[in-house]
Amino acid sequence: MSVTVLVGSQWGDEGKGKIVDILSKHYDIVTRYQGGANAGHTVSINNKQFILHLIPSGILREKVICVIGNGVVIDPTALIEEINLLEKNDIKVDGRLYISHNAHLIMPYHKLLDSINESGENKIGTTGRGIGPCYIDKYARKGIKIVDLLNRKLLEEKIRENLKEKNNLLKKVYGHEELDVDEIIKQYVEFDKLIDKYIKDVPAYLNGAISEGKSILLEGAQGALLDVDHGTYPYVTSSSPTSGGACTGTGIPPTKIDSVYGIVKAYTTRVGYGPFPTELLNDDGELLRKIGAEYGATTGRPRRCGWFDAFLVGYSAMINGIDSVAVTKLDVLSKFDEVKVCIGYELDGRSLKSFPTDVERLSKVKPVYETLPGWKKEISGCLSYSDLPKETKDYLKFISETSGIELKIISVGPNRNQTFFVN
Ligand code: GDP
Ligand code: IMO
Ligand code: MG
């Protein structure tokens, strides 16, 4: 169990934060490898709730070292806010947080362009955190990296060069007022003073730690179906949340990854636009949202809700190489007389053999459901697998078999103690 990748197996918000917190007790280091402050990972300890956006969820375990890898895009304001909030709650960050010198910085124009793009016709329903525009600049080789903060002259040059182009775009294409370049330079120079102490050569650090026998948990953000390559493009995020992204986003080679944990919600949710075959646009969907408190941890937007999709999770298990699964929010299904599971899709009267990621086809599929009896009992107080009602165990067995996944952890509430292992 030395190097484990933990991935969201659906469309994000599966409860990764909670499970990272549970598992990190057994790891030395927890590392984020992609995404940015679009993530909202909730950890509840003794009914106190922490929502982490950039800092790995392992920060709440005092012996754990937390690392932000090169694949993450960092919004300085969000990072400083998060550090301050943690320290205000007596959680020590100094000496426990390292940031890759190769991570890219979210700039004010990234956030602005994100919101301008979203005000147009082709909306994705982004979190507005500047994620897409920042990764665009990264791949266009115009991005500003953490390491650039260490060289004032170069930093200033790079910001000026970028602003020339961005201000042109803002003014001439979008009719927006120009951004003040000197103000931005001042802001990022200030930022350097605050984060200098966290900067590290992360690939050297992590590979060195592995050689010393230390264990690492790689915390994915978002979910497999939001992956820019394997998700429901264009309704995706701009990074690689799937397990493959853990290597490029940290500098840990594939040969050093030992296992992949998939986090699966007991039903399905999605935030933003894009096809969602098992979505429930009825009272059942409302009930899931209400009982599951399905509102975004980052934006507060209501999450779209639907039945568990075993066909989708099976696809996710394949592309991520998932070997163990944690099922979360099982307690949310307790009110239903019956629960449905999607076991396949039909398109034009034919059953599909593989999951269609192209949105044209995915938006037309008809989910094929199996209906199972509900358990109609409160399970949030269950302390072990054997405490669960028979119908709940049957549901778990059914989703495990139809998705081709092995269940290891069951979560029946947001708190640490509402979690147990399957024996
Ligand atoms: P993440 O982005 O994958 O970390 O998930 P979020 O934190 O965005 O959303 C998961 C929400 O469900 C949070 O509010 C958690 O506190 C909550 N949660 C996690 N596990 C459970 C569970 O087993 N039962 C219930 N009722 N809530 C849970
Ligand atoms: P965690 O880590 C759920 C969604 C947005 C939008 C799309 C693109 O908490 O699971 P972006 O701002 O990334 O360009 O938005 O991706 N999205 C998430 N949905 N959970 C998340 O993170 C998400 N991060 C982004 O709603 O549909
Ligand atoms: Mg979330």
Image (tube, rainbow, N blue to C red):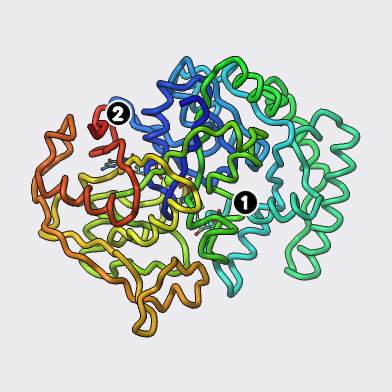
Report the residue at 25% width, 56% height from top: 288
Residue type at mark 2? Arg
- The one nearer the camera, 28 or 255, is 255
- Label 2 crowd bin: few (<14), some (14–19), many (20+), radius 10 Å: some
Residue type at mark 1? Ile
Quadrant location, the C terminus:
top left
- The one nearer the camera, 318 or 366, is 318
**Residue 319 point in image, percent of width and height:** 50, 53
Q: Is residue 107 above or below residue 421?
A: below
Determine the quadrant in which ligand 3 lies: top left
Residue 416, label in figure: 2
Residues at marks 2 and 1 touching, judged by CB atoms closer than 8 Å: no
Q: Is residue 43 above or below residue 177?
A: above
Residue 131, label in figure: 1
Number of numbered discs present?
2
Q: CA distance from mark 2 to mark 1?
A: 31 Å
Looking at mark 1, is its residue's CB closer than 8 Å to ligand 2? yes
